[in-house]
Amino acid sequence: MLNRRVFLPILIFELLPYGLVCAAQEAARASLPDDVAQSPTATPPNNSEQAKKPVALTRDWRYQLTPGDTFSIRFPLTPEFNQPDVAVQPDGYVTLQGVGEVPVAGKSLPELRKLLQDKYSKIVSPQAITVELKDFEKPYFVVGGEVGHPGKFDLRSDITVTEAVSIAGGFKDTSKHSQVLLFRRVSDQWTEAKVLDLKKMLKEGNLAEDSHLRPGDMIYVPKNTISKIKPYLPTSYVGAAYNPAGY
C-alpha cells in the first residue's frame, strides 16, 4: 500500500480518458484561490515577457513535520525542560512540558525552533533551543504508468523527472513520453499538475525544462494512442501500422 502522502491521481487516469482529466485539471485551476493559482506552474499573462519562457517547478524546499515524526528538544541553560522524545500525534499536535499542546504538523525545523522559543520565552529565560529530528518520513517520489518498474523510491539526492523515469526502469513501448505528468501537492486541498514533453527534451538533448523533484512528487506516464486502440484492431492492421513497408 502506498504511503499516506502518495497522491491519488493515478486512479483518475485508470478510469478516465486523458482528455477528460486535462479538462478537469483546467477547471480546477480556474477555481483556485489567487495565492494558489499563481503557483510556479501557473501560466503568466500573455502580455508578459515571462509568458514566452519555460516555467519550472521550484526546487526550494525544507522538510515539514508530519504525524508520526519524533524529535528531541534540548535547553542548554535549563536542562530540566529537555525532552528526548516528542511525538507528533495523528492530529498534528505535540504535548510539551510546561506549555501543553502545540500544533506542529507542516512546520519546518526553523519554524518549529522559532515556535518553541516563543512558547517557552514565557516560562524560561531566552536561550538557544536545539531541535533534532529523530524519526521521520524519509523523502520519496512515486513513478506510475507506462514505465518498467513503477513504484515508490527514496529521494536520496537532487534528481530530475528524466532521471526518476530511468530509476523506475525507463519508458515502455506503450508510453506516451511526450505528455508525462508531474503531480505536486501545494496544500492539503490542492495538488498542481504539470505536463512535460520528455520526448522532445531527449530528442533535442535540451533538459532546461526538466523539473527537479521534491519529496512526495508523483510522476505518471500515460499510454500512447496505439497501445489504447490495439486491443480492438485486426491483427493485420496493427502489423501494417508497425511495418508499413511490408517487411
Image (cartoon, helix red, strand yellow):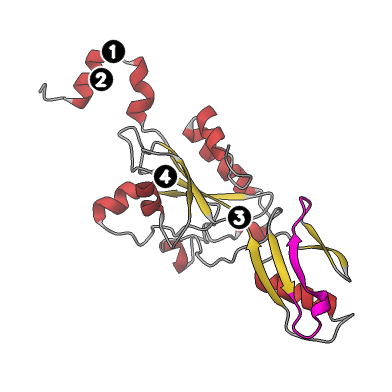
Q: Which residue is mark 4?
A: 180
Name which residue type carries label 3: Glu
The foreground one among 52 and 152 is 152
Q: Disc 4 on helix, strand or loop?
A: strand
Give coordinates of residue 232: x percent, y percent: 36, 15
Label 4: how many Cα within 10 Å (few below 14, some 14–19, many 20+): many
Give the label on residue 137, or none: 3
Label 3: how many Cα within 10 Å (few below 14, some 14–19, many 20+): some
Q: Which residue is mark 2?
A: 238
Look at the numbered discs 2 and 3 and tell me whether their residues touch, using CB distance below 8 Å.
no
Left or right: where does residue 214 sit relative to residue 119?
Answer: left
Residue displayed at 70% across by 53% down: 68
Left or right: where does residue 135 sit relative to residue 125?
Answer: left
Residue displayed at 36% across by 30% down: 225
Q: Disc 3 on helix, strand or loop?
A: loop
Separation (CA) of disc 1 from disc 3: 49 Å
Q: Which residue is mark 1?
A: 234
Which image quadrant is residue 25 in? top right
Sequence-wise first label, 2 or 4 = 4
Look at the numbered discs 3 and 4 and tell me whether their residues touch, using CB distance below 8 Å.
no
Sequence-wise first label, 3 or 4 = 3
Q: Which residues are magenta?
A: 74-91
Left or right: where does residue 206 sit relative to residue 33?
Answer: left
Give coordinates of residue 51: x percent, y percent: 46, 62
Name which residue type carries label 1: Pro
Name which residue type carries label 2: Val
The foreground one among 36 and 166 is 166
Look at the numbered discs 4 and 1 and tell me whether their residues touch, using CB distance below 8 Å.
no
Residue displayed at 64% across by 59% down: 135
